[in-house]
Amino acid sequence: MKQEFYSHGKLLLTGEYVVLDGAKALALPCKQGQKLHVEVIKHLAPTDRATLAWKSYDQKNHLWYETTFLLPLHQASNTENQKNIQDKTLLEILLAAQALNPDFLQEGISLKSYIVTTFLEFDRSWGLGSSSTIIYNIAKWAKVNPFLLLEHSFGGSGYDIAAAGATGAITYQRNLKNIGLPNITDHSEFCPKFKDALFFVHLNIKKNSKEAITSYRSLDKTDLDKIILKINQITNHLLTCPSLTEFEKLLHTHEDLLSNLLQVPTIKQQLFPDFNHGIIKSLGGWGGDFILATGKEKAKNYFRNKGYTTILNYEQVILGNP
């Protein structure tokens, strides 16, 4: 028996960090994602030991990770897999899925082994959701709530989990009283008329999401409610923004709000103070992964001349209306 699951990568246009505290965020699913194939091998001889063999391939179809877990799935029986951080993380996710659905990887275990293969469609260093797509796919395989699986394993706001299963832009609000039921609204119609002037630049650094969240949680957030209200207004206005000029003003205001909250200079102030072709907006954790920039070819050349060669047009990446 074979099963296949698929989920999309993501970019977060508004609400980074404050989405953790219930702000309305505008998330954009990517055309690129990750596949998960599951093959079940039945009729093992009584003396055979059931296993879960895992292999992961990158966007160039190169094997970058593999491991094998013994079944039944217990930490005690997989002590060798505690030495590698990737093994440990994957085991924690699988055990969390099993805690949510006790039948997962258990039913008829003596007669089954599993071969799991994943295929990533984007560079692992890009920060488009190599972890969130795995969590979403495992949740679908295990038939559990993906937001609860995230909460009990990797942690985070869950916007990336929502984007993994979306078919277009969404607004996302974390339900702080019921993590498993966030408020998600489909905005697949979102398609800026000026999208030809929007592009994404990779900063050649992969941001650690857990570290970014930990740093944010340690901040003094006295005016958080006021900031969230303003972020929500920006998110709502962006959905119907009629012009590039208005779009740029909204994102500039967003950057200033978060800069003041995080007590960190904007990425433009840090790295690109002389950029005068449009605006620059951080996406997700500040200081790494992708930024959004506006402008034409001169704007792209500005980044190329500074050594930032991974530049993607809006239509290359974002899933939704043409």
Image (cartoon, grey):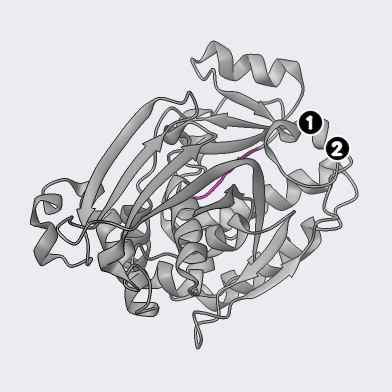
Could you tell me what secondary structure mostly forms the magenta stretch? strand
Residue 106 placement (x, y as % from top left): 31, 72
Quarter in which the C terminus is drawn? top right
Residue 75, picture quadrant: bottom left
Q: Residue 165 carries which label?
A: none
Circle 2/circle 1 CB separation < 8 Å: yes
Q: Residue at 49% of width from left, 48% of height from top?
A: 36
- Residue extending farthest bottom: 177
Residue 154 placement (x, y as % from top left): 35, 62
Density class for disc 1 (Cα within 10 Å; few <14, some 14-19, many ≥20) is some
Magenta stretch encompasses residue 243: no
- Residue extending farthest top: 305
Residue type at numbered disc 2? Phe
Q: As rendered, which of 90 and 173 lies closer to the eye?
A: 90
Q: As rendered, which of 265 and 308 lies closer to the eye?
A: 308
Q: Residue at 57% of width from left, 14% of height from top?
A: 304
Q: In the drawing, does residue 273 fall left or right of residue 27?
A: left
Q: In the drawing, does residue 244 fall left or right of residue 47?
A: right
Tag 2 residue? 194
Q: Residue at 58% of width from left, 50% of height from top?
A: 6
Q: Which mark is residue 197?
A: 1
Residue 280 placement (x, y as % from top left): 62, 37
How far apart, in angstroms, are the residues tagged by discs 2 and 1? 6 Å
Density class for disc 2 (Cα within 10 Å; few <14, some 14-19, many ≥20) is some
Q: In this view, does 158 lie above or below 168?
A: below
Residue type at numbered disc 1? Ala
Q: Is residue 160 above or below residue 123?
A: below
Q: Which contiguous range is marked in magenta?
A: 280-284
Q: What element carries label 2?
A: loop
Q: What element carries label 1?
A: helix
* Residue 24 seen in the current view: no
Q: In this view, does 187 lie above or below 256?
A: below
